[in-house]
Image (cartoon, rainbow, N blue to C red):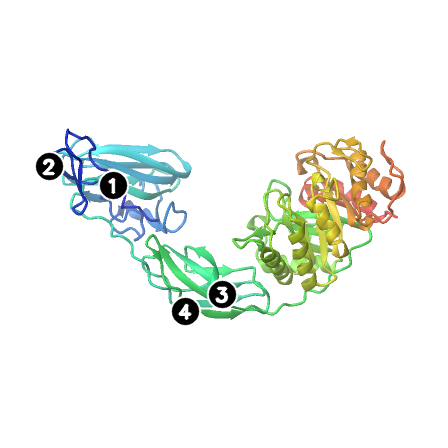
Amino acid sequence: MHVDRTTTRPHGRRLLGGALALAVGSGLVLVGGAGTAQAADVNVARNAGFENGLADWSCSAGSGAAVSSPVRTGAGALRASPAGLDNAKCVQTVSVKPNSTYTLSAWVQGGYAYLGATGTGTTDVSTWTPDSASWKQLTTTFTTGASTTSVQIYTHGWYGTSPYLVDDVSVFGPDGGGGQDPDPTVPSAPAGLAAGTVTTGSVALSWGAVSGATGYKVYRDGGNPQTVTGTSATVTGLAADTAYQFQVSATNAAGESAKSAAVTVRTAKPTDPGPGPAVPRHAVTGYWQNFDNGAAKQKLRDVQAAYDIIAVSFADSTATPGQITFNLDPAVGYASVADFKADVAAKKAAGKSVILSVGGEKGNVTINSDATATAFADSAYALMQEYGFNGIDIDLEHGVNATYLTKALRQLSAKAGSSMVLTMAPQTIDMQNTGSEYFKTALAVKDILTVVNTQYYNSGSMLGCDGKVYSQGSVDFLTALACIQLQGGLAPSQVGLGVPASTRGAGSGYVDPQVVKNALDCLTRGTGCGTFKPAQTWPSLRGAMTWSTNWDATAGNAWSNAVGPHVHNLP
C-alpha cells in the first residue's frame, strides 16, 4: 500500500480585501494583505500504509500483523485478531500542534473495526463500523488542547469477533514536528532471478526481495509484463520445447527499476498423450464442471459412463489477449493436479474423449487478430500436451470473429494432428443462418470439426428451417432448428442436440428426456416428430449434449440413463 502524502489542505481561502500570495518555496499560505502565514496540512501518521510492517505501531497481546493481502493500495496492510478478552487494539502516538484541528481516517475491512484518538486535550473521539466485506473508510475529527503536543490514535476490533484489516491511515492537520513518512524512491533492480519447476507450458520463477518495492513486473523476451506483489511467479501459456528469456523489475509509487539480469529457460519437451479413442458414430457429450455451483461435485472418474465426450469447463483467459490457461478449482476436491491428469488418462483408456471447453456464460477469450489467433493456438496446444486433453470445445457466447477464430483453430489442428476433437456449443441465435460468425466458423473448419451441439435452451422463440416460429421446450423446437444446420452445409455427423440435464441446469428450455429421444428419432428415423416433419432423415446425426454431468448426477442420472442408450442405438 502507498499513502499519497502529497495531498495538502490549506487552512483558509478567505480574501480580506487584498491579494492572495502563495509562498511556494516555504510551503506557507499568506491570507489577506497583512495576513498570517499557515503551513499546509500534512499526514502526521507514520508508516501509515504498513509498508514497513508494524514499525511505529504497537498492538495488544501480539494481536496485529502486517500482511501483503488483502491490501487497499501498495503492498501492506494491518490485520488484527481479537481473542478472548483482548480486542486487538493497535496504537501509534503522533506529534501534533496545540489548538489545532485534525482529520483522522482509515480504510477498514473484515470484522468490527473502531478508529479513534485519545489524549487530545479536549474531547476524545472514535467511530466504528460492523463487518465489511470490502474496504470502507472511517473518518472523524478532533481538536487538540492548548498544551497538547501528542495524541494517541488507535484501531481495535470487538471481543470474540472476526479479524479486521486496516490500510491507508491518515491524520491530516498542521505538522506537529514529528515528521512524515519519507517519499518513496525508485527501487533497485532485483537480484537472484532463478527458474524453478518447468513444464511443457509454464516456468516458475523466483527472485530476491527489494527494499521499498511494492510490486514486481516479470518480462518474457523483453515484453509481455506480468505484475505480481510477491517474489515469485509462474509464467503460463508457453509453447513446449521452446527457449524463453525472463527478466524482472521492482516497482513502487516512485517508478520502476531497471530490469534484472536475464535468465534463459527452455520449456519441457511434450509427452505425446496419444491420439485418444475415435469418437463413436453416435455420441453423447457432457460438460463437467470445474467449479461448485450447487450441483453434485464430481471428479472426472465419477462422470457417468454414458458420456463419450467430456468437456472440461472451463479454460481461463490470461492477461495476454487470445491466450488461455487452466486452473483446477480446489472446490472440486482433487488432492493434486497429478490426480486430475490421471483421471484424464483413465477416461481416455476407457474409450472417452476429454476436451477443454473455452468460454461459457462468464468466460471469454478475444481472438481478433493474427497475434491473438497464434496465442490461442499455442496455449491451447500446450494445455493439451500438459493435461492430455484430446481437443477443444468452443463455447464462446459473444465476440466471435470467424476470420481469426478459424485461423486459430487451423493452427491448433496443424499442431495437434487429425485426431484432435473439435466441438462447438453455440447459442440458438448464433446458428439461425449461415451468415452468422459462429455458423461461418463452423463451415470454415468443417474438415476438422467433430460436432456442433447447439444450446437449445435459455432461448426465446426462434425460426425453424421452414421459416415458422417455434418456442423452446418442444420436439419441434429441437428438430426445426437442427434442420437449419443440416440444410446449411454441416454434415449430419456434425450436428448434435444440446439440452439441460435437469430443470436446475438452465434458466429455461428444459425438456423431458423423452422429448430428446423423440427429436433424435424424428431426425434420424422420421418417427416421433411433432407438427414439424422434415422432408428427409439424417441417420448419421451425431447425437446429443447436456449441461452438465454434474446436474445430471444431481437429478439421479435420469438424463444419461435415458438419453445415453438411445443415442448409442440410433441407426
Q: Nearer the viewer, mark 4 or mark 1?
A: 1
Rendered view: 539 above or below 124 = below
The disc, 3 or 2, on the residue closer to the chain's N-terminal end is 2
The disc, 4 or 1, on the residue closer to the chain's N-terminal end is 1
The answer to whether mark 2 and mark 1 are in CB contact below 8 A is: no
Q: Which residue is drawn at 32% across and 44% down?
A: 168
The disc placed on residue 261 is 4
Q: Which of marks 3 and 2 is in front?
A: 3
Q: Distance between the residues labelled 1 and 3?
A: 42 Å
Q: Name the residue under label 3.
A: 221
Disc 4 secondary structure class: loop
Disc 1 secondary structure class: loop
Closest to the observer, 92 or 44: 44
Q: Distance between the residues labelled 4 and 3?
A: 12 Å
Q: Name the residue under label 1.
A: 8
Rendered view: 151 above or below 335 = above
The disc placed on residue 147 is 2
